[in-house]
């Protein structure tokens, strides 16, 4: 029985695959190690799908302009921010972050900016790259 | 006929409803007579995560991202309700532009939820091609939500007094393109779900919920609108910007069908609501006023206001699955919420299972269970008790689905002859 579904299925045999095998066909165990390989030109990657304009990725923290008002700690839902008493600055655990962006909204000095960086997956949540201002 | 003591002892066997392979933990106990169901009992409560308790130890701002994570599909619904409840309790007024953006986001999610449901329903009766088709077209609205908010599933869009992100004019063409895409595809969806003879055989007259039962059991959403009950919070008690918009109850009788309350009517109502959502978003884009997106630009000021606030509030909205609400109580001088209660729409709709299952076949269990769009209730494990022999056994979800597929094949074979 020729139905509409059959035509769709046949058409799909010849269309481009929706899945983008980024960065390589089989995901490496450690993204940062893979990034180093890419940097030295040893690994060739597939380009990534374009990220949306308002994308909320890894936080960037401007340590110099931070005044230590602790407002960001009051709105962080996942306790990803820890206050360092002796330094009067904030420590940020990227692995705990939910990327809601509330700290960036409340900060009176705009110390936090949610960047476009999304390659932050790793096996060790306390890795050097995953703690800002350690 | 039923042996009470025996029932309870068998239920005690903890064949865990929580299992990594299951979608959501849930249990329904059935009593069957041969192939017919003569009793159904829903046993929720396997998915209690203590989210309300967690919320009562945080300040309201910390609870917004938490409330999003109550459900994986309706993250917009729960933040909307929670934010409305807190605004109600603390007398914060959102700006008009924020109200319109809230409506646009809610309706986009309704499109997403209904298309997803259509795929699940098709899967339960053995049409996996339709599952893949509907989930493929669902990607478009997911992409749009990602484009507007920046994230694919948890949007972090709501805040007290407004929204976090604006929908500027430059985003309109993409929204309009997506709406057009759905409008063009709608004919195909209707052809598949309302016109296909094999789907009609599996849905017409199955899982009937009469109007009286729907009213008595306090069902909500498309589940009872399919039975002809005029119930929709968007019209009955307008919230956000729904009061300014032109909306109508989507009943099967509006389109020349009977309000039978079977699975077919529920499918019809959901598909028609998809068209309605497209229309609502268009109205919003036309009428949206040019204002700030938040009535209080300084978040710290709102934080202080919430600390001083004293009172209770409710957020009552029409989720894609039906009416749901949040209750919040704030105490003066206390940063954390004093009380938080969530009532999702599936809680009401579970009661409608009993009349819908009555007299149906075992192979109809998956589609009837899916027809209320249960949020915690995928048919993970069902216990069957044969009332004639007293024998009891359990069906795994896969086996039930196989039975369901077999029934479709049988009906299709009958059609060919």
Image (cartoon, rainbow, N blue to C red):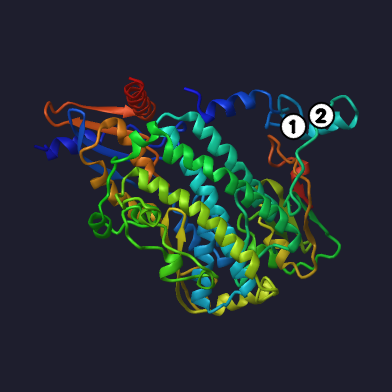
Q: Around disc 1, counting alpha carbons within 10 Å, would you say few (fewer than 14), some (14 to 19), or many (20 or more)?
A: few
Q: Which residue is drawn at 84% across and 25% down?
A: A43
In this rendered view, identify the residue nearer to me: B107 or A30. Answer: B107
Gap between marks 2 and 1 measured at Cα? 7 Å
Q: Which residue is drawn at 12% across and 26% down?
A: B389
Q: Residue at x 68, y 55 (%)?
A: B148
Q: Which chain carries label 1?
A: A
Q: Would you say the residues marked 2 and 1 are in contact, meaning their CB atoms lie under 8 Å apart?
A: yes
| x then y, percent, for residue B96 | 61, 74
Tell me the residue that label 2 is attached to.
Answer: A45
Q: Which mark is residue A22?
A: 1
Q: In this view, does B102 lie above or below B20?
A: below
Residue B362 in view, yes or no: yes
Instruction: Decide if residue B386 is on the left or right side of residue A60.
Output: left
Q: In this view, does B396 lie above or below B63?
A: above
Furthest-left residue in view? B1
**Rendered-image quadrant of the N terminus of chain B:** top left
């Amino acid at each position: 029985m020729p139905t509409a579904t059959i035509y769709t299925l046949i058409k799909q045999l010849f269309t481009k695959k929706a899945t983008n095998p980024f960065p390589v066909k089989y995901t490496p165990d450690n993204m940062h190690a893979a990034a180093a390989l890419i940097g030295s030109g040893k690994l060739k990657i597939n380009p990534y799908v374009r990220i949306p304009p308002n994308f909320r990725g890894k936080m960037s923290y401007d340590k110099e302009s931070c005044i230590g008002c602790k407002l960001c700690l009051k709105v962080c839902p996942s306790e990803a921010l820890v206050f360092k008493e002796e330094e009067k600055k904030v420590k940020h655990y990227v692995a705990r972050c939910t990327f809601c962006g509330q700290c960036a909204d409340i900060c009176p000095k705009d110390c936090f900016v949610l960047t476009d960086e999304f390659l932050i997956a790793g096996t060790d949540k306390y890795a050097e790259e995953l703690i800002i201002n350690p | 006929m039923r042996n009470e003591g025996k029932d309870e002892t068998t239920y005690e066997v903890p064949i865990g409803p929580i299992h990594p392979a299951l979608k959501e933990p849930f249990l329904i106990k059935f009593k069957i007579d041969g192939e017919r169901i003569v009793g159904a009992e829903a046993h929720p409560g396997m998915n209690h995560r203590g989210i309300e308790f967690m919320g009562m130890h945080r300040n309201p701002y910390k609870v917004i991202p938490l409330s999003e994570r109550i459900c994986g599909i309706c993250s917009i619904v729960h933040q909307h309700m929670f934010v409305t409840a807190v605004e109600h309790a603390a007398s914060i007024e959102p700006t008009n532009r924020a109200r319109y953006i809230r409506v646009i986001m809610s309706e986009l999610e309704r499109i997403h939820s209904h298309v997803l449901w259509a795929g699940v329903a098709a899967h339960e009766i053995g049409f996996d091609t339709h599952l893949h088709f509907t989930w493929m077209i669902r990607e478009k609205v997911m992409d749009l939500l990602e484009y507007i908010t920046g994230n694919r599933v948890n949007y972090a869009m709501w805040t007290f007094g407004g929204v976090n992100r604006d929908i500027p004019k430059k985003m309109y063409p993409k929204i309009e393109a997506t709406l057009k895409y759905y409008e063009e595809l709608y004919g195909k969806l209707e052809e598949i779900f309302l016109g296909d003879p094999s789907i009609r055989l599996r849905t017409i007259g199955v899982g009937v919920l009469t109007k009286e039962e729907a009213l008595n059991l306090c069902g909500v959403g498309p589940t009872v609108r399919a039975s002809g009950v005029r119930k929709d919070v968007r019209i009955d008690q307008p919230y956000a910007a729904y009061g300014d918009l032109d909306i109508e109850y989507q009943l099967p009788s509006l389109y020349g069908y009977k309000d039978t309350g079977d699975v077919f009517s529920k499918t019809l109502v959901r598909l028609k609501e998809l068209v309605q959502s497209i229309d609502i978003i268009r109205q919003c884009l036309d009428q949206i006023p040019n204002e700030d997106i938040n009535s209080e630009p300084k978040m710290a000021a709102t934080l202080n206001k919430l600390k001083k606030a004293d009172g209770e509030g409710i957020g009552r909205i029409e989720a894609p699955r039906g009416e749901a609400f949040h209750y919040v109580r704030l105490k003066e001088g206390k940063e954390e919420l004093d009380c938080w209660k969530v009532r999702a729409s599936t809680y009401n709709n579970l009661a409608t299972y009993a009349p819908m299952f009555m007299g149906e076949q075992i192979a109809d269990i998956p589609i009837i269970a899916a027809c209320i769009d249960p949020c915690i209730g995928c048919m993970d494990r069902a216990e069957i008790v044969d009332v004639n022999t007293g024998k009891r056994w359990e069906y795994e979800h896969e086996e039930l689905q196989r039975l369901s597929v077999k029934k479709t094949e049988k009906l299709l074979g009958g059609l060919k002859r």
